[in-house]
Amino acid sequence: MRCAIHPDVETNLRCAKCGKPICPKCLVETPVGAKCRDCAGLSKLPTYYVSTKYYLRAVGTGLVIAIICGLVWGVVVSLVPFFYLNLLLAPGVGYVIGELVSLSVNRKRGTGLAVVAGITVVISYLISSIRFFQGMILFSFSFSPFYLVVIVVALALGIFIAVSRLR
C-alpha cells in the first residue's frame, strides 16, 4: 500500500475513520486511534481564531488607549523632567495597552493583535512628544545619540510587554 498523501512512501497504516492509507508523517494520534489529518479535524484553538470584528475592536481600543496614555505620558514627562523616566513609562504604557486590547477582544491572542498593540505603543510615544507653543504644534525630539538610544530601548521594552500580553 502507498500513502494517499505521499505516494512514494509504503505503509500498512490506515485511517481509523475513512480507511485511507496513511504514512507515519501523515498520521494524527487521537484517543480512538490513528487518523488522517482530514478526519482528525485539526483546527485552530478558539483563542487564536480572530475575526475581522475583533481586529476592528483591537484597533479602536488601541488608538483610544494610545491617545489617553500618550497625553498622560506627555504631561508626566513635562512635569517631571527626569531623563530616564521614559524607561519606566514606556513599559507601563505597553502593559496598559496590551492588557486593555486583550480585554477588548475577549482575551484572544495572535500575531495580528500583537502587531496592533506594538504599533499603538509607538503612537502613544509620538503623542507624548507633542508640545504646544504659542498656538503651534511642535514635536519635542532630540537627535543626540544618547537620547535616541534611551528612547529606542524604552520603546522596545514597551512594545515587548504589549506584545507579550497578546502572544
Image (cartoon, helix red, strand yellow):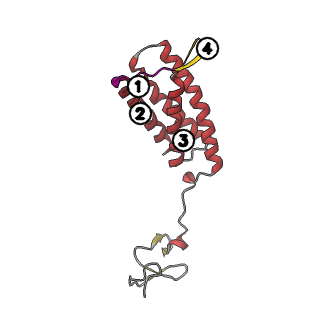
Classed neighbour count for the residue bearing mark 2: other residues with Cα under 10 Å, few (<14), some (14–19), many (≥20): many
Q: Mark 1: which amino acid?
A: Leu
Classed neighbour count for the residue bearing mark 1: other residues with Cα under 10 Å, few (<14), some (14–19), many (≥20): some
Q: Residue furthest right?
A: 53
* Disc 1 and disc 2 in contact, CB within 8 angstroms: yes
Answer with mark 3 or mark 2, whichever residue precedes in sequence. 3
Q: Main secondary structure of the magenta part?
A: loop
Residue 147 percent coordinates (x, y): 37, 23
* Disc 3 and disc 2 in contact, CB within 8 angstroms: no
- Check the image and report above or below for 7 versus 124: below
Depth check: give the residue in front, 79 or 100.
79
Spatial CA distance of label 3 from label 2 is: 16 Å
Residue 36 percent coordinates (x, y): 50, 75
Spatial CA distance of label 1 from label 3 is: 21 Å
Spatial CA distance of label 3 from label 4 is: 32 Å
- Check the image and report above or below for 34 versus 123: below
Judging by the rendered image, the residue that carries numbered circle 2 is 157
Answer with mark 1 or mark 2, whichever residue precedes in sequence. 1
Residue 63 percent coordinates (x, y): 60, 34
Answer with mark 4 or mark 2, whichever residue precedes in sequence. 4
Helix or strand or loop: what does disc 2 sit on?
helix
Spatial CA distance of label 4 from label 2 is: 33 Å
Spatial CA distance of label 1 from label 2 is: 8 Å
Depth check: give the residue in front, 33 or 89.
89
Q: Mark 4: which amino acid?
A: Gly
In the image, the segment drawn in magenta is: 139-146
- Which quarter of the rendered picture does the N terminus lie within? bottom left
Answer with mark 1 or mark 3, whichever residue precedes in sequence. 1
Judging by the rendered image, the residue that carries numbered circle 1 is 87
